[in-house]
Image (cartoon, rainbow, N blue to C red):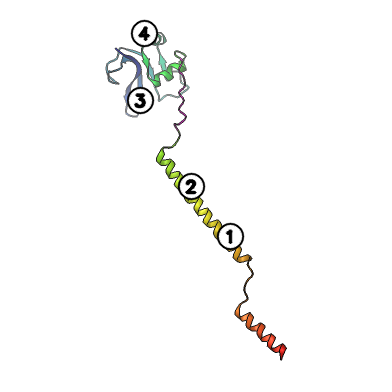
Amino acid sequence: MSVSIRLSRGGAKKRPYYKIVVANSRAPRDGAYLEQVGTYNPVLAKEDENRVRLVEDRVRYWLGVGAQPTDRVARMLDKAGIKERAASVNPTKAEPGKKAKERAEDRATKIREAEEAAAEAAAAAAAAAAAPAEEAPAEEAAAEATEASTEA
């Protein structure tokens, strides 16, 4: 029989209270258990000494017999100094999925294209402003009239 040390939920709705129990791993979460070895009250402040209460010698006994704690209980046992727990490392946990990466790439290319188009438009406007302006037809007519009057 595989034995685990886990939490069994009690308490009212939105007011959880847990028993730390030793149970058959195939038994239901709140079902029959072999022994209660502590309590956990998540409603209390983290600094409160009554938040996690453990019967240390019984926990050590069950660990010696081969009981496997769940991840949450293993954290509590590590904090209490009963059983060392190696920290898990998952470097790809915060990495976005394949579709999110594709959407980000599409968004980046659209932004890049818009910036290039804006740069080209700005360059064209600067070139137009820098180019010598052609004389207007009215100025040409006035210039011809002055030339004709000087010749005559």
Q: Which mark is residue 16?
A: 3
- Mark 1: amino acid: Ala
From the image, tell me which residue sits under label 2.
Answer: 108
Residue pictured at 53% horizontal, 54% vertical: 116
To which quarter of the image does residue 78 belong? Answer: top left
| Amino acid under disc 4 | Val
- Left or right: 140 with respect to 101? right
Question: Which quadrant is the N terminus positioned in?
Answer: top left
In space, the residues marked 1 and 2 are separated at their CA atoms by 22 Å
The residue wearing badge 1 is 123
The residue that mark 4 highlights is 65
The answer to whether mark 2 and mark 4 are in CB contact below 8 A is no
Choose the circle earlier in sequence order: 3 or 4.
3
Viewer can see residue 141: yes
Considering the numbered disc 4 on the image, is that residue within a helix, a strand or a loop? helix
Residue 138 at x, y percent in the picture: 61, 81
Considering only order in the chain, which callout, 2 or 1, is on the residue closer to the N terminus?
2
Residue displayed at 56% across by 56% down: 119
Looking at marks 2 and 4 on the same chain, the residue that comes earlier in the sequence is marked by 4
Q: Are marks 4 and 1 in contact (CB under 8 Å)?
A: no
Count up the numbered dots. 4
